[in-house]
Amino acid sequence: MVAEFGLAGVLLFMTLFLAISENYPRVPERPSTTFRFLSVWLLAAVVLEELGSGFYIHLWMWFPLGLSALGRYISVQRMAGLDPTYAPA
Amino acid sequence: MWRATATFAEPRYLANHLLTAIVSAAWLARKRFNRDRRTEGLLWIAALIVMAAGILFTMSLGGIAALFVLVGGMAVAVHRMLTRRVRLFVIAGLAVVVLLLGVYAGTSGGRVPRRVRERLRAELASPAESLYSLTAPYFSRGFYLHNARYALLVTNNSPFVGIGVGQFAAVGKSAENSSASPTWFRAAAPGSGSRAWSPSSASRACSSS
C-alpha cells in the first residue's frame, strides 16, 4: 500500500477510515439502526482481510469502505430522526 | 493442492470477497430477525454458513483466521438482542457444529482440516533459505516477506506519492531488466523474470514442473 500510494495515499486512507469510525463508542445502540452494525463490521472485515493479506492491498478490495460509509450515514440520519436532540460531532 | 478460487486469480481474493459478503448476510439476517421474519433470517444465516465453508475451502490461512475473528465478534455483538430461548438454541447449534467439525478433523477422511494443517505446518516450518524457493510446496509467507522487502525499497525511492496504482509488479519487472539496478534489488523485484511473486502463480509453476 505504501509503495503504490505513498505517504499521501496512506494519509487519505487513514482520513477516510477515521471519518467513518468517528465517535462510534459514543453513539448509543438502537435496535432500529442495524446500519451501524453493517458499517462497523464492514470496516472490521476490511482491516482483517488486509491483515490477512500482509497489507498487499488492491484498491478494488476497498469497496466495502464505501458501503461502510453509506451505512454510517444512514445510521446517523436515522438516529437524528429518532432523537431530535442527537447531533453527531 | 486444490484450493477454491471461483473466478478470482488468487484463493485469498475469494476469501476477502466472502468476508465482506458474510458481514452483509449477517446484517440482513439481523434486520429480518428484528422484524420478526425468522424464516428469512434463518435463510440468511444458512447463506452465511455456506460462505464460511467457501472461505475454509480457499485454504487461505489469513482468511480463515479473519473469518473466526469476524464471526466471533459479530456473534458477541448480537447475542444481547436474542431472547434466552433463541440464545440457548444458537449455543446448542454451535456446540453441535463444533463437535461435528472436531470429529471430522480427527478422522483421516477429513481432507479440508488435514490440508489446512499441512499448510500451517509448512508455513511455520519452512526454513529461511527456502522462503523464496519455487520448489517448496506452500510458501505464501515467503512471498509476503519478499513483497514487503521490495515495497520498502520502492517506498524509499518515492515516499510521498508512491509509484502509482497497479505499478508494483510492473516496476519490479523494469527494475529486473535495468542494468543500473543492483543485483539484490533486481532479485527482490516481484513479478520479474522467472521469479513469480504470487502464491498461486508459483503453485502453478510448481505443479507444471
Image: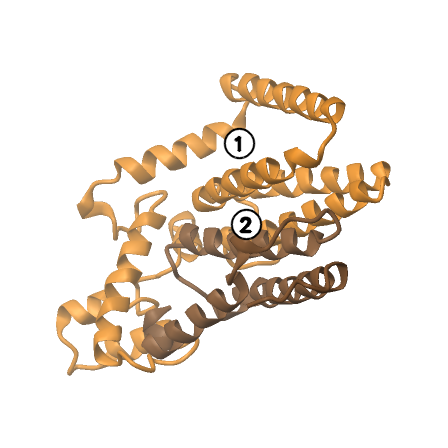
Answer with left or right where residue A84 lies relative to residue A46.
Answer: right
Q: Nearer the viewer, residue B109 or B29?
A: B29
Question: What numbered label is drawn on residue B206?
Answer: none
Where residue B108 sits: x, y (%)?
50, 18
The vertical placement of A83 against B135, above or below, is below
Residue marked by disc 2: B15
Where residue B120 sits: x, y (%)?
37, 35
Label 2, secondary structure: give it.
Answer: helix
Image quadrant where residue B76 sits: top right
Answer with left or right where residue A18 lies relative to residue B151.
Answer: right
The vertical placement of A21 against B115, above or below, is below
Residue drawn at point x = 35 percent, y = 68 percent:
B191
Residue drawn at point x = 65 percent, y = 67 percent:
A73
How far apart are labels 1 and 2 at the CA level?
15 Å
Q: Note the chain letter of the brown one.
A: A
Q: Nearer the viewer, residue B114 or B148?
A: B148
Mark 2 is on which residue type?
Ala
Chain bearing mark 1: B
Chain bearing mark 2: B
Residue marked by disc 1: B112
State which quarter of the image contains the C terminus of chain A: bottom right
Q: How many marks?
A: 2
Q: From the image, state the color of chain B.
A: orange
Q: Is residue B17 visible?
A: no
Evaluate whether label 1 is on the same chain as label 2. Answer: yes
Mark 1 is on which residue type?
Val
Q: Is residue A51 visible?
A: yes
**Mark 1 or mark 2: whose residue is earlier in sequence:** 2
